[in-house]
Amino acid sequence: SRNIRLAVIPGDGIGTEVVAEGLKVLEAVGVKIESTHYDLGATRYHATGETLSDEVLQELRGYDAILLGAIGDPSVPPGILERELLLRLRFELDHYVNLRPVKLFPGVETPLADTLPGDIDMVVVREGTESLYAGAGGVLRRGTPHEIATQESLNTAFGVERVVRYAFARAAERPRKKLTLVHKTNVLTYAGDLWQRTVNRIAPEFPEVTTDYQHIDAASMFFVNQPERFDVIVTDNLFGDIITDIGAAIAGGIGLAASGNINPDRTAPSMFEPVHGSAPDIAGQGKADPTATILSVAMMLDHLGLTEEAARVEQAVADDIVERLAGWAGRTTHEIGDDITARVSGGA
Amino acid sequence: SRNIRLAVIPGDGIGTEVVAEGLKVLEAVGVKIESTHYDLGATRYHATGETLSDEVLQELRGYDAILLGAIGDPSVPPGILERELLLRLRFELDHYVNLRPVKLFPGVETPLADTLPGDIDMVVVREGTESLYAGAGGVLRRGTPHEIATQESLNTAFGVERVVRYAFARAAERPRKKLTLVHKTNVLTYAGDLWQRTVNRIAPEFPEVTTDYQHIDAASMFFVNQPERFDVIVTDNLFGDIITDIGAAIAGGIGLAASGNINPDRTAPSMFEPVHGSAPDIAGQGKADPTATILSVAMMLDHLGLTEEAARVEQAVADDIVERLAGWAGRTTHEIGDDITARVSGGA
Ligand SMILES: CC(C)[C@H](C(=O)O)[C@@H](O)C(=O)O
Ligand SMILES: CC(C)[C@H](C(=O)O)[C@@H](O)C(=O)O
């Protein structure tokens, strides 16, 4: 089988811990990997002032995929590592699809009452390269009573159309074939109108898909009290950020939420990362759940065409989760990683 | 006792139904009211093309308060009534505090498992006159592959400081005295920095209040799995819109969520409205729960200094809700209104 060239960016805090377990599982699944570690993140920033150099970025373009742990540390002012490293990677590598499944695995405790696994099974297709994440904006008279600060959301027909088309294609593959646009068309009238018109225009290309619209505020509410409404969601970068954290909460917590920053045109490597952050408060204690990273590894395998291997990892996670029910709580990061690795190997 | 001059805008859909019940309760509470109805909304728009004329706006300034039902109808393109009527009222009447309590009443069924009334008891202070709601933005090459659409968030030191100071004052009055800023400082760096610096600068004026910060994505998650984290929240207009709908969901649904669009400087009347919309799908069927409007009436009484009357209405609602537990489900809009009215009168 082919060799996968993988760039690994463990990052900060629990990032390094969970990535180690993800790699363990990846090895056990029996694919040939050539991985190179990059020590990007807070430590490197403090030591050298560097977040992401043009040279490193250029090098990263040469890999088949990137596995990322988590970026961010309280010792660095908010926004620096996020904008100059994490978001720069997403933008430069044109990860226009930020794919975030929201699925309640059997055996997982959800904070929602009377909710069964079948009730929560959706995929959020979050746009990854536009809107308020563009970083446009500015400040005048900073620190004075006359300060004004602006942030600009930039949205293009090009950017919206490609992610909407991707979302339709995903919806067409799923049993329910339902696509919900989430936006705030009644307030963000210019951007919302572009999104809604784009969905309307692409819809006839996918006659088997039914479409639907919800405002972000209503959608957030429905995540909590009617999650079964949703199948595939397509949404803007910021709304997607918010709604996928609600998704993580209802599907059992941030310890299980995986994501892929996808470049569907494959003009650059896609990047896979748990939805959670670096969690400095529990870093180094073996308390982090590596499951989100392991599920992100499964998404990566799937993206690389290794469908059978991806399914094997996902099944191992599903089995491991059922086992938790039977009283396996309190395992360390390593132990969870080892247990899932053993299942993957056993099933090989 | 004094005469309250009240402007009533029932609006669209279930707005008219719930407002009628709110007025019934208001009458029963024994305050002298002089109310004038304004037929603003979809019907007026279709008949005359008018959303809110300068003359009507000027007239509205003369009242002590405004009671609003709901605005919006599918027959009007998204954004027209919202921007030209509802948001115009909030902006022109300088409702810079959009006050939204999130409180689980005993007896209300929450969608969250293992959650008790004491776990959900917070107040969201949503900014009401700035940010992406300013309506700034534009579109170029509409409908072509080269379209770009922008939305601009406008934030001022003046606007942020006054709402932050209000939120600190609210927090100082409450037993827990905790204020959480919710924003997205790691991405919206200019606006987020203004908000965070403002909170830091005002904090010493309220040494008894502890402050805290959460990103909007994390806060949305915590609403679902750790709502007890929050006491008073201060946040931006858009984040407040989203988070208060999650709040409504966890506190038992949109049928119970009240709000006040407050002008704390009293340079113009404040406006009270349920958080829910016009719900055209159930309009005219007597299915709408008027409780959110009745609780908004209580907020209005409180704002007008009628503290005892406000408490009486809130107590009547609390008692009515406990009664629901005992099997009073399935009442019509009128019946709920009548029941609460009877309690208010009985307790007078
Ligand atoms: C860390 C932050 C910049 C990031 C985002 O907002 O996209 C995170 O919240 C996420 O969802 O991956
Ligand atoms: C109708 C809409 C413009 C409004 C808002 O976004 O503020 C509503 O959602 C609300 O929360 O009152």
Image (spheres, coloured by chain):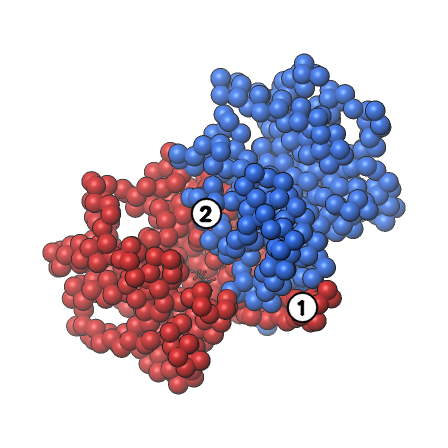
Chain colours: A blue, B red
At 52% from the left and 33% from the top, the residue drawn is A104
Q: Nearer the viewer, residue A246 or B156?
A: A246
Three-letter residue code for mark 1: Gly
Please indicate whether residue B136 sits to the left or right of residue B326 in the image. right
| Residue under label 1 | B143
Q: Which mark is residue A222?
A: 2
Image quarter for ligand 2 = bottom left
The reply to whether the residue tagged 2 has its Cβ within 8 angstroms of ligand 2 is no
Residue A147 in sight: no
At 11% from the left and 56% from the top, the residue drawn is B346
Dot 1 crowding, Cα within 10 Å, few <14, some 14–19, many 20+? few
Please indicate whether residue B17 sits to the left or right of residue B203 in the image. left
Residue B39 in sight: yes
Three-letter residue code for mark 2: Phe
Mark 2: secondary structure: helix
**Measured Cα–Cα span from mark 2 to mark 1:** 31 Å
Q: Furthest-top residue in view?
A: A346
Specify the subunit that label 1 lies on: B
At 85% from the left and 49% from the top, the residue drawn is A54
